Image: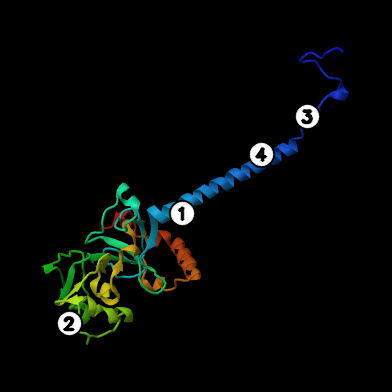
Amino acid sequence: MASIETGAVLPEAAQVPPPSAAPRRARVARAGYADFFESLLVTILIALFGTTFILQAFKIPSQSMEPTLLVGDHLLVNKFIFGGTGAWYEKFLPYRPVRRGDIIVFKFPFDDHPHYVKRVIGLPGERIRIVNQLVFVDGSLLNEPYVVHDPSQDDPFADNFPPENDRFSRYNMRSEWAGQIMGFVHNAALVVPPDHYFVMGDNRDRSWDSRYWGFVDRRAIMGRPLFIYWSVAATAEDYNDRSLLGTIHGLEDGLIHLTSRTRWHRMLREVH
Protein backbone atom coordinates (compact mmCIF):
# COMPACT_ATOMS: atom_id res chain seq x y z
CA MET A 1 0.00 0.00 0.00
CA ALA A 2 1.45 3.27 -1.11
CA SER A 3 2.07 5.71 1.67
CA ILE A 4 1.26 9.37 1.63
CA GLU A 5 4.27 11.58 2.10
CA THR A 6 4.18 14.42 4.52
CA GLY A 7 2.92 17.48 2.75
CA ALA A 8 1.06 15.47 0.14
CA VAL A 9 -2.37 16.76 -0.80
CA LEU A 10 -5.34 14.57 0.03
CA PRO A 11 -8.00 13.94 -2.53
CA GLU A 12 -10.77 16.60 -2.35
CA ALA A 13 -13.28 14.16 -0.89
CA ALA A 14 -10.88 13.31 1.94
CA GLN A 15 -9.89 16.87 2.87
CA VAL A 16 -10.99 18.11 6.39
CA PRO A 17 -13.07 21.32 6.14
CA PRO A 18 -11.70 24.38 7.97
CA PRO A 19 -13.32 25.04 11.34
CA SER A 20 -16.18 27.53 11.38
CA ALA A 21 -15.34 31.06 12.60
CA ALA A 22 -18.56 31.36 14.63
CA PRO A 23 -17.63 28.83 17.38
CA ARG A 24 -14.22 30.49 17.67
CA ARG A 25 -15.82 33.92 18.19
CA ALA A 26 -18.12 32.42 20.81
CA ARG A 27 -15.16 30.94 22.68
CA VAL A 28 -13.35 34.28 22.56
CA ALA A 29 -16.47 36.06 23.85
CA ARG A 30 -16.87 33.58 26.71
CA ALA A 31 -13.21 34.00 27.62
CA GLY A 32 -13.65 37.79 27.56
CA TYR A 33 -16.67 37.62 29.88
CA ALA A 34 -14.79 35.29 32.22
CA ASP A 35 -11.81 37.67 32.37
CA PHE A 36 -14.11 40.62 33.00
CA PHE A 37 -16.00 38.98 35.86
CA GLU A 38 -12.76 37.63 37.32
CA SER A 39 -11.27 41.14 37.31
CA LEU A 40 -14.48 42.55 38.79
CA LEU A 41 -14.47 39.95 41.54
CA VAL A 42 -10.82 40.63 42.39
CA THR A 43 -11.53 44.39 42.47
CA ILE A 44 -14.49 43.88 44.82
CA LEU A 45 -12.46 41.62 47.10
CA ILE A 46 -9.59 44.12 47.23
CA ALA A 47 -12.06 46.95 48.00
CA LEU A 48 -13.71 44.90 50.75
CA PHE A 49 -10.33 44.02 52.23
CA GLY A 50 -9.23 47.64 52.10
CA THR A 51 -12.37 49.05 53.75
CA THR A 52 -12.35 46.28 56.34
CA PHE A 53 -8.71 46.42 57.40
CA ILE A 54 -6.96 49.50 55.98
CA LEU A 55 -8.92 52.59 54.88
CA GLN A 56 -12.51 53.76 54.94
CA ALA A 57 -14.28 57.00 54.04
CA PHE A 58 -16.54 58.91 56.43
CA LYS A 59 -18.25 62.29 56.43
CA ILE A 60 -18.85 64.75 59.29
CA PRO A 61 -22.57 65.44 59.90
CA SER A 62 -22.43 67.56 63.08
CA GLN A 63 -20.68 70.53 64.72
CA SER A 64 -19.19 68.63 67.66
CA MET A 65 -15.59 68.67 66.36
CA GLU A 66 -15.47 72.22 65.02
CA PRO A 67 -13.23 73.98 64.21
CA THR A 68 -10.98 70.93 63.69
CA LEU A 69 -13.57 69.16 61.56
CA LEU A 70 -16.44 70.96 59.88
CA VAL A 71 -19.85 69.71 58.82
CA GLY A 72 -19.38 68.46 55.27
CA ASP A 73 -15.77 67.34 55.67
CA HIS A 74 -15.17 63.92 54.10
CA LEU A 75 -12.41 61.95 55.78
CA LEU A 76 -10.23 59.03 54.88
CA VAL A 77 -9.76 56.97 58.05
CA ASN A 78 -6.74 54.79 58.74
CA LYS A 79 -7.99 51.52 60.25
CA PHE A 80 -4.50 50.02 60.21
CA ILE A 81 -3.03 51.96 63.13
CA PHE A 82 -4.21 51.03 66.62
CA GLY A 83 -3.21 47.94 68.53
CA GLY A 84 -4.50 46.80 71.87
CA THR A 85 -7.15 44.32 70.83
CA GLY A 86 -5.02 41.35 71.90
CA ALA A 87 -4.92 39.78 68.44
CA TRP A 88 -1.95 37.45 67.85
CA TYR A 89 -0.84 39.30 64.72
CA GLU A 90 -0.43 42.70 66.41
CA LYS A 91 3.21 42.11 67.32
CA PHE A 92 4.04 41.58 63.65
CA LEU A 93 2.37 44.78 62.39
CA PRO A 94 3.15 48.52 62.85
CA TYR A 95 0.32 49.15 65.30
CA ARG A 96 0.52 51.63 68.16
CA PRO A 97 -1.64 52.21 71.24
CA VAL A 98 -4.38 54.82 71.37
CA ARG A 99 -2.96 58.07 72.76
CA ARG A 100 -4.48 61.06 74.47
CA GLY A 101 -5.27 63.69 71.86
CA ASP A 102 -5.95 61.14 69.10
CA ILE A 103 -9.04 61.84 67.04
CA ILE A 104 -10.81 58.52 66.63
CA VAL A 105 -13.73 57.09 64.68
CA PHE A 106 -15.69 54.53 66.68
CA LYS A 107 -19.01 52.77 66.92
CA PHE A 108 -21.44 54.46 69.28
CA PRO A 109 -22.23 52.06 72.15
CA PHE A 110 -26.02 52.32 71.81
CA ASP A 111 -28.82 52.24 69.24
CA ASP A 112 -27.69 50.93 65.84
CA HIS A 113 -24.02 51.72 66.61
CA PRO A 114 -23.60 54.66 64.21
CA HIS A 115 -20.08 55.96 63.65
CA TYR A 116 -18.93 58.86 65.85
CA VAL A 117 -15.76 60.93 65.77
CA LYS A 118 -14.29 62.48 68.95
CA ARG A 119 -10.96 63.26 70.58
CA VAL A 120 -9.47 60.96 73.23
CA ILE A 121 -9.15 62.76 76.57
CA GLY A 122 -8.84 59.99 79.16
CA LEU A 123 -6.95 56.70 78.90
CA PRO A 124 -7.64 53.51 80.88
CA GLY A 125 -7.03 53.99 84.60
CA GLU A 126 -6.86 57.79 84.45
CA ARG A 127 -8.93 60.13 86.62
CA ILE A 128 -10.94 62.79 84.78
CA ARG A 129 -12.35 65.94 86.33
CA ILE A 130 -13.72 69.13 84.75
CA VAL A 131 -13.81 72.33 86.82
CA ASN A 132 -15.30 75.45 85.24
CA GLN A 133 -14.69 74.00 81.75
CA LEU A 134 -11.04 73.18 82.51
CA VAL A 135 -10.08 69.51 82.16
CA PHE A 136 -7.82 67.84 84.71
CA VAL A 137 -6.28 64.39 84.14
CA ASP A 138 -4.87 62.74 87.25
CA GLY A 139 -4.89 66.15 88.92
CA SER A 140 -2.95 67.96 86.17
CA LEU A 141 -4.50 70.62 83.95
CA LEU A 142 -4.77 69.41 80.35
CA ASN A 143 -3.52 71.81 77.66
CA GLU A 144 -6.24 71.89 74.98
CA PRO A 145 -5.47 74.48 72.28
CA TYR A 146 -8.01 72.83 69.97
CA VAL A 147 -11.05 73.48 72.21
CA VAL A 148 -13.66 76.19 71.61
CA HIS A 149 -16.53 77.23 73.88
CA ASP A 150 -19.85 78.83 73.06
CA PRO A 151 -20.78 81.51 75.62
CA SER A 152 -24.45 81.13 74.67
CA GLN A 153 -24.48 77.54 75.94
CA ASP A 154 -24.79 76.93 79.67
CA ASP A 155 -24.59 73.39 81.03
CA PRO A 156 -23.45 73.20 84.65
CA PHE A 157 -23.36 69.39 84.45
CA ALA A 158 -20.83 69.35 81.59
CA ASP A 159 -18.80 72.33 82.80
CA ASN A 160 -18.25 70.78 86.26
CA PHE A 161 -17.96 67.05 85.81
CA PRO A 162 -18.48 64.42 87.18
CA PRO A 163 -21.44 65.07 89.50
CA GLU A 164 -20.80 65.00 93.21
CA ASN A 165 -23.78 62.75 93.97
CA ASP A 166 -26.72 61.08 92.28
CA ARG A 167 -28.90 64.22 92.55
CA PHE A 168 -27.86 65.60 89.18
CA SER A 169 -29.76 66.67 86.10
CA ARG A 170 -30.25 63.80 83.68
CA TYR A 171 -31.12 66.09 80.82
CA ASN A 172 -29.55 64.97 77.54
CA MET A 173 -28.01 61.86 79.19
CA ARG A 174 -28.42 58.27 78.14
CA SER A 175 -30.47 56.58 80.81
CA GLU A 176 -28.00 53.68 80.88
CA TRP A 177 -25.13 56.02 81.68
CA ALA A 178 -27.15 58.02 84.21
CA GLY A 179 -27.62 54.82 86.18
CA GLN A 180 -23.94 53.82 85.99
CA ILE A 181 -21.89 57.00 86.26
CA MET A 182 -21.67 57.25 90.05
CA GLY A 183 -20.09 53.79 90.16
CA PHE A 184 -17.03 55.26 88.36
CA VAL A 185 -16.72 58.38 90.52
CA HIS A 186 -14.04 58.25 93.23
CA ASN A 187 -12.75 61.28 95.17
CA ALA A 188 -14.60 63.71 92.91
CA ALA A 189 -13.05 62.29 89.70
CA LEU A 190 -14.29 59.89 87.03
CA VAL A 191 -12.03 56.82 86.77
CA VAL A 192 -11.72 55.36 83.27
CA PRO A 193 -12.04 51.54 83.40
CA PRO A 194 -9.62 49.12 81.69
CA ASP A 195 -9.84 48.87 77.88
CA HIS A 196 -12.04 51.97 77.71
CA TYR A 197 -11.54 55.64 76.80
CA PHE A 198 -13.12 58.96 77.72
CA VAL A 199 -13.74 61.14 74.67
CA MET A 200 -15.05 64.64 74.00
CA GLY A 201 -15.61 66.92 71.03
CA ASP A 202 -13.46 69.99 70.36
CA ASN A 203 -16.58 72.14 70.14
CA ARG A 204 -17.02 71.43 73.81
CA ASP A 205 -20.42 73.07 74.40
CA ARG A 206 -22.01 71.49 71.33
CA SER A 207 -20.66 67.99 71.72
CA TRP A 208 -22.67 64.98 72.90
CA ASP A 209 -19.84 62.84 74.23
CA SER A 210 -18.59 60.67 77.10
CA ARG A 211 -19.99 63.09 79.64
CA TYR A 212 -23.49 62.18 78.50
CA TRP A 213 -23.31 58.53 77.42
CA GLY A 214 -20.14 56.97 78.87
CA PHE A 215 -16.90 55.40 77.76
CA VAL A 216 -15.73 54.06 74.41
CA ASP A 217 -14.78 50.39 74.40
CA ARG A 218 -11.43 49.66 72.73
CA ARG A 219 -13.13 47.09 70.50
CA ALA A 220 -15.43 49.81 69.14
CA ILE A 221 -12.57 52.00 67.87
CA MET A 222 -12.27 51.73 64.10
CA GLY A 223 -9.38 54.04 63.33
CA ARG A 224 -7.95 57.53 63.10
CA PRO A 225 -8.73 60.12 60.38
CA LEU A 226 -5.77 60.73 58.10
CA PHE A 227 -6.85 63.70 56.02
CA ILE A 228 -9.83 65.49 54.48
CA TYR A 229 -10.14 64.29 50.90
CA TRP A 230 -13.16 66.50 50.12
CA SER A 231 -15.04 69.22 51.97
CA VAL A 232 -18.39 70.68 50.99
CA ALA A 233 -20.14 73.64 52.60
CA ALA A 234 -23.07 72.13 54.50
CA THR A 235 -25.10 72.34 57.70
CA ALA A 236 -26.13 69.67 60.18
CA GLU A 237 -29.69 69.91 58.81
CA ASP A 238 -28.41 68.75 55.42
CA TYR A 239 -27.56 65.37 56.98
CA ASN A 240 -30.66 64.87 59.11
CA ASP A 241 -32.20 62.49 56.60
CA ARG A 242 -29.97 59.40 56.77
CA SER A 243 -32.25 57.17 54.71
CA LEU A 244 -31.11 55.78 51.36
CA LEU A 245 -33.25 58.35 49.53
CA GLY A 246 -31.83 61.16 51.65
CA THR A 247 -28.27 59.98 50.99
CA ILE A 248 -28.90 59.85 47.23
CA HIS A 249 -30.47 63.31 47.29
CA GLY A 250 -27.52 64.71 49.25
CA LEU A 251 -25.04 63.17 46.81
CA GLU A 252 -26.97 64.54 43.83
CA ASP A 253 -27.11 68.02 45.37
CA GLY A 254 -23.40 67.89 46.14
CA LEU A 255 -22.51 66.95 42.58
CA ILE A 256 -24.73 69.68 41.12
CA HIS A 257 -23.06 72.34 43.28
CA LEU A 258 -19.64 70.70 43.27
CA THR A 259 -17.58 73.72 42.25
CA SER A 260 -19.49 76.38 44.18
CA ARG A 261 -19.81 74.52 47.51
CA THR A 262 -16.47 72.71 47.67
CA ARG A 263 -14.12 74.12 50.30
CA TRP A 264 -11.01 73.86 48.17
CA HIS A 265 -8.72 75.19 50.92
CA ARG A 266 -9.56 72.18 53.12
CA MET A 267 -8.79 69.56 50.49
CA LEU A 268 -6.07 67.07 51.53
CA ARG A 269 -5.71 68.75 54.93
CA GLU A 270 -4.20 66.47 57.55
CA VAL A 271 -6.37 65.80 60.60
CA HIS A 272 -4.78 66.15 64.03
Helix, strand, or loop for circle 3?
Answer: loop
Q: Residue tagged by mark 2?
A: 164
- Compared to residue 167, the image places residue 149 above or below, namely above
Q: In this view, does 72 lie to the left or right of 210?
A: right
Q: Is residue 91 left or right of residue 50?
A: left
Where does the N terminus fall, quadrant-wise? top right
As rendered, which of 157 and 167 lies closer to the eye?
167
Circle nearer the N terminus (3, 4): 3
The CA distance from mark 2 to mark 4 is: 77 Å
Circle nearer the N terminus (2, 3): 3
Instruction: Name the front one of labels 2 and 3.
Output: 2
Helix, strand, or loop for circle 2?
Answer: loop
Circle nearer the N terminus (3, 1): 3
Q: What residue type is labelled 4?
A: Val
- Compared to residue 57, the image places residue 199 above or below, namely below
Q: Give me the residue at 11% from left, 69% from top.
A: 139
Q: Which amino acid does label 3 sit on?
A: Pro
Q: Residue tagged by mark 4?
A: 28
As rendered, which of 175 and 246 lies closer to the eye?
175
Helix, strand, or loop for circle 1?
Answer: helix
Label 1: how many Cα within 10 Å (few below 14, some 14–19, many 20+): some
Label 4: how many Cα within 10 Å (few below 14, some 14–19, many 20+): few
Q: In which quarter of the view is residue 255 placed?
A: bottom left
Label 2: how many Cα within 10 Å (few below 14, some 14–19, many 20+): some
The CA distance from mark 4 to mark 1 is: 30 Å
The CA distance from mark 2 to mark 3 is: 95 Å
Q: Which mark is residue 18?
A: 3
Q: Which amino acid does label 2 sit on?
A: Glu
Instruction: Name the front one of labels 1 and 2.
Output: 2
